[in-house]
């Protein structure tokens, strides 16, 4: 009986979260990506963040249908977070937190260790890795 129960729990667990690694208290690798899903315009992205050491990722000019991405490891004693400013000539600008090493941020927004943001004409979307869809999280501040 116990064996059967364990088997069922294992099966459910595996079926529920296929290949998506979840939040971990121990240092783990993360990926953040910003996609240009606009109908025209280059997307300018400027992100700054890190943990013990803050890194300026520089001003990035992301062409249409391309992306800018970076990877890093979370830290044991310091929370890693990244903030980004997005600018598009026809839409305006957006300032947001692209990543925070916090379990609720990851579960709620990214759904795992890959946070994929997409800038579109009607706002900013984040791909939820477990729900397998983009969710709109913000709108542009008009210039
Ligand atoms: C983004 O813009 C805001 C307001 O203009 C500024 O305070 C912030 O430092 C900028 N952050 C980055 C990462 O460029
Ligand atoms: C990340 O960006 C590089 C270019 O800097 C690109 O070649 C690569 O395909 C991107 N990775 C993903 C997963 O989109």
Image (cartoon, rainbow, N blue to C red):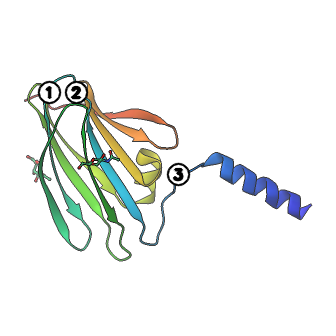
Mark positioned earlier in the residue sequence (1 or 2): 2
Is residue 103 shown above or below 94? below
Q: Is mark 1 within 8 Å of ligand 1?
A: no
Q: Quadrant of residue 87?
A: top left
- Residue 105's spot in the image, x, y percent? 40, 52
Mark positioned earlier in the residue sequence (3 or 1): 3
Secondary structure of the residue carrying tag 2 is loop
Question: Which residue ends up furthest to the top in the rendered image?
Answer: 39
Quadrant where the C terminus sits is: top left
Instruction: Please give the residue where the numbered disc 3 appears in the rendered image.
Output: 20
Task: State the residue in front, 138 or 38.
Answer: 38
Instruction: Please give the residue where the numbered disc 1 appears in the rendered image.
Output: 91
State the separation of the CA atoms marked 1 and 2.
9 Å
Q: Is mark 2 within 8 Å of ligand 2?
A: no
Q: Nearer the viewer, mark 1 or mark 2?
A: 2
Instruction: Please give the residue where the numbered disc 2 appears in the rendered image.
Output: 38
Give the left or right position of residue 32, taking residue 27 as reference: left
- Residue 110's spot in the image, x, y percent? 42, 47
Mark positioned earlier in the residue sequence (2 or 3): 3
């Amino acid at each position: 009986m116990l064996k059967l129960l364990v088997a069922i729990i294992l099966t459910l667990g595996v079926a529920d979260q296929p290949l998506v690694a979840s939040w971990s208290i121990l240092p783990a690798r993360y990926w953040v990506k910003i996609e240009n899903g606009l109908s025209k315009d280059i997307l300018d992205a400027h992100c700054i963040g890190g943990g013990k050491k803050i890194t300026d990722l520089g001003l990035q000019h992301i062409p249409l249908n391309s992306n800018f991405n970076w990877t890093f490891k979370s830290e044991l004693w310091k929370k890693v977070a990244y903030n980004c400013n997005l600018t598009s000539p026809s839409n305006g600008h957006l300032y947001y937190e692209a990543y925070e090493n916090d379990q609720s941020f990851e579960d709620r927004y990214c759904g795992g260790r890959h946070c994929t943001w997409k800038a579109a004409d009607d706002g900013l979307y984040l791909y939820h890795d477990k729900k397998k869809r983009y969710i709109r999280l913000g709108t542009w501040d008009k210039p």
